């Protein structure tokens, strides 16, 4: 195993970078959040036929964003996802779940880079601001 690479998280017009040396806490937050602290494997929650509950994904992703330096609240993420879904577009929830799989090491970003949905307002931005690093 070569180790971790930095992980980028996009929210609104911001790009947050979690450096490799800070990713164990990020992984633990995703695992604990998706399993609701009850043990089990987060990968099983993600691979469930219906996927994890939307509100749970929003809460966990907001926690991940805050760890990376954002001020996004759980409700900010929840409202953005629901606005997206009301418009008939599921690209934001797909982005969130893809980031979880990337954080957990279940996928390699290089294999999905061209398949990620195009950015929308309030989501992954087309013109990101300067990158921020988790401290």
Image (cartoon, grey):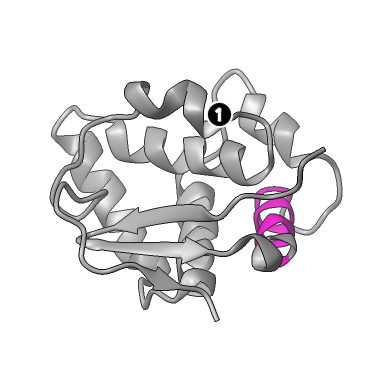
**Is 49 on the left-hand or right-hand side of 42?**
left
- Residue 61 point in image, percent of width and height: 49, 56
Name the image quarter holding residue 96.
top left
**Is 75 on the left-hand or right-hand side of 39?**
left
Residue at x-position 69% and y-position 66% = 21
Residue linked to disc 1: 51
User: What element does badge 1 sit on?
Assistant: loop
Q: Tell me the quadrant of the picture where the C terminus can be found.
A: bottom right
**Is 118 on the left-hand or right-hand side of 8?**
left
Name the image quarter holding residue 101.
top right
Main secondary structure of the magenta stretch: helix
Front residue (pair 33, 55):
33
Q: Tell me the quadrant of the picture where the N terminus can be found.
A: top right
Furthest residue toward right: 39
The reply to whether the magenta stretch includes residue 50 is no
Residue at x-position 21% and y-position 58% = 128
- Residue 18 point in image, percent of width and height: 54, 64
Specify start and end residues of the magenta stretch as a single range. 25-35
């Amino acid at each position: 195993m070569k180790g971790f690479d930095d992980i980028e998280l996009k929210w609104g017009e911001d790009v947050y970078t979690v450096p490799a040396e800070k990713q164990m806490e990020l992984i633990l937050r995703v695992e604990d959040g998706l399993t609701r602290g009850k043990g089990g494997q987060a990968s099983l929650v993600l691979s469930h036929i219906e996927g994890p509950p939307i509100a749970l994904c929003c809460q966990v992703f907001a926690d991940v964003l805050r760890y990376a330096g954002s001020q996004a609240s759980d409700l900010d993420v929840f409202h953005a996802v629901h606005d997206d879904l009301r418009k008939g577009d599921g690209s934001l929830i797909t982005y969130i779940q893809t980031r979880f799989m990337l954080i957990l090491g279940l996928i390699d970003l290089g294999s999905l880079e061209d398949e990620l949905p195009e950015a929308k307002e309030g989501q992954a931005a087309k013109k990101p601001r300067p990158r921020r690093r988790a401290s």
